[in-house]
Image (cartoon, rainbow, N blue to C red):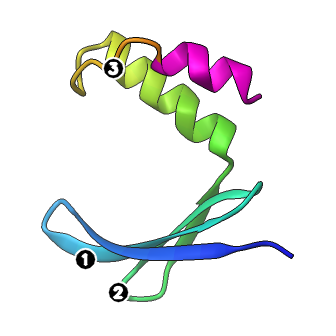
């Protein structure tokens, strides 16, 4: 049975929710009910690019090694 977690977050001063279902990725939903889904692999690729472009702070040492071990 898949487990689901949901959290409320703010993006660009707008509230939305993000849901995670084990093994399937993430679904973002805004207040108007619009949804977009993204596989975990795509989310991690975006994070990798953002880190390389210094758009997000550097991740802890060993983060990407740990990700590779779990793929």
- Looking at the rendered structure, the secondary structure element under dot 1 is strand
Residue 24, position in %: x, y?
75, 57
In the picture, measured across the screen, residue 9 lies left or right of residue 62, that is left
Q: Which mark is residue 24?
A: none
Q: Is residue 67 magenta?
A: yes
Q: In which quarter of the image is the C terminus?
A: top right
Q: Is residue 36 magenta?
A: no
Q: What kind of secondary structure does the magenta stretch mostly adopt?
A: helix
What residue occupies the far right of the structure in this picture? 1
Image quadrant assignment for residue 12: bottom left
- Looking at the rendered structure, the secondary structure element under dot 3 is loop
Density class for disc 1 (Cα within 10 Å; few <14, some 14-19, many ≥20) is: few
Density class for disc 2 (Cα within 10 Å; few <14, some 14-19, many ≥20) is: few
Label 3–label 2 contact, CB within 8 A: no
Q: Residue 60 carries which label?
A: 3
Density class for disc 3 (Cα within 10 Å; few <14, some 14-19, many ≥20) is: few
Residue at 21 percent of width and 24 percent of height: 57
Q: Which of marks 3 and 2 is in front?
A: 3
Residue tagged by mark 1? 15
Residue 54, position in %: x, y?
23, 16
Residue at 49 percent of width and 31 percent of height: 46
- Looking at the rendered structure, the secondary structure element under dot 2 is loop
Distance, label 3 to label 2, CA atoms, is 33 Å
Residue at 64 percent of width and 75 percent of height: 4
Q: Which mark is residue 31?
A: 2
Residue at 44 percent of width and 30 percent of height: 47
Label 2–label 1 contact, CB within 8 A: yes
In the picture shown, does residue 70 fall above or below 6? Answer: above
Distance, label 2 to label 1, CA atoms, is 7 Å
Task: Please provide the residue range marked out in magenta.
Answer: 63-71
In the picture shown, does residue 49 fall above or below 13? Answer: above
């Amino acid at each position: 049975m898949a487990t689901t977690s949901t959290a409320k977050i703010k993006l660009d001063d707008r509230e939305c929710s993000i849901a995670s279902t084990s093994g399937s990725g993430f679904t973002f939903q805004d207040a108007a009910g619009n949804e977009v889904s993204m596989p975990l692999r795509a989310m991690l690729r975006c994070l990798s690019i953002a880190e390389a472009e210094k758009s997000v702070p550097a991740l802890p040492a060993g983060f990407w090694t740990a990700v590779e071990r779990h793929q």
